[in-house]
Image: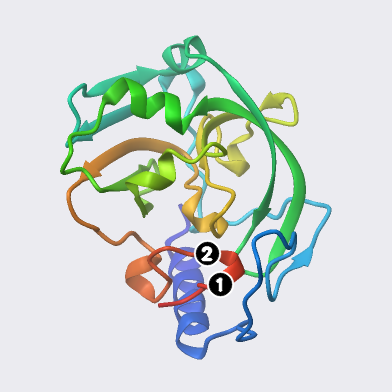
Amino acid sequence: MDEAKREKLIQSKERWAREGRLLTGMSADPATRLPPGQHEVKNWPVLDLGGQPDVAREKWHLRMDGLIRNPMAWRHADLLAQPQTQLTVDIHCVTSWSRYDNRFEGVAGQHLLSLVDPLPEAQHVLIHSFDGYTTNLPLWVLAEPDVLLASHWDGKPLTREHGGPVRLVVPRLYFWKSAKWIKRIEFLDEEQLGFWEERGYHAFGDPWREQRYS
């Protein structure tokens, strides 16, 4: 990982948060396809923290722990052995691009929750990635019908640059919440801010309410 590139990127994005870069001050009904301040792109831009961990599918693993009745650890074959869900969703990056009609395939968040069985006190999750990245979500977000642990995009295995072997996809929130290279889901009783949330970005991140920054 290029540490100089990583630090420069982090400082740049922290400056965006301090300056309120890209904010329009508007909000929109979620039925509106393009959130405020966004523009549609046809390509899929690649964003990371200055490096892309090279995790082979046969070495990928996901740990689910914390406040759950059934802690689990999956290998890639375990994930593929679960019921697979295909969804076509739009995605919205906080850097202002939106991409329509992305075809993802993977394991539904609802299915994962049915297996791990969160305890009543579990109200939040912290997502951990192989590159040290983290992001936080309320537990109920994982139960939304369009949330996936995605292993495929557009009918093909998810590439390394886009978070493969497996990434989270949370299409109703800004895409920094859809952590790449996911390796752990930690179930918590209170909110613990993730990487960008600690650096000035919104704890929830609703694009239609333009929750870019805290």
- Name the image quarter holding residue 89: top right
Front position in the image: 104 or 51: 104
Q: Which residue is mark 1?
A: 209
Q: Which residue is mark 2?
A: 206
Q: In this orientation, does residue 94 appear?
A: no
Residue 17, position as x, y percentages in the image:
47, 81
Question: Around disc 2, counting alpha carbons within 10 Å, would you say few (fewer than 14), some (14 to 19), or many (20 or more)?
Answer: many
Q: In this orientation, does residue 164 appear?
A: yes
- Name the image quarter holding residue 163: top right
Residue 27, position as x, y percentages in the image:
62, 76
Q: Are marks 2 and 1 in contact (CB under 8 Å)?
A: yes
- Name the image quarter holding residue 186: top left
Give me the residue at 74% from left, 64% from top. Answer: 34
Front position in the image: 144 or 134: 144
Question: Around disc 1, counting alpha carbons within 10 Å, would you say few (fewer than 14), some (14 to 19), or many (20 or more)?
Answer: some
* Element type where label 2 sits in the image: loop
Q: Looking at numbered disc 2 in the image, what kind of residue is underneath it?
A: Asp
Give me the residue at 57% from left, 53% from top. Answer: 172
Up/down of 205 relative to 66, above or below:
below
Up/down of 128 relative to 196, above or below:
above
Q: Looking at numbered disc 1 in the image, what kind of residue is underneath it?
A: Arg
Residue 71, position as x, y percentages in the image:
21, 24
The image's colouring method is rainbow
Front position in the image: 131 or 111: 111
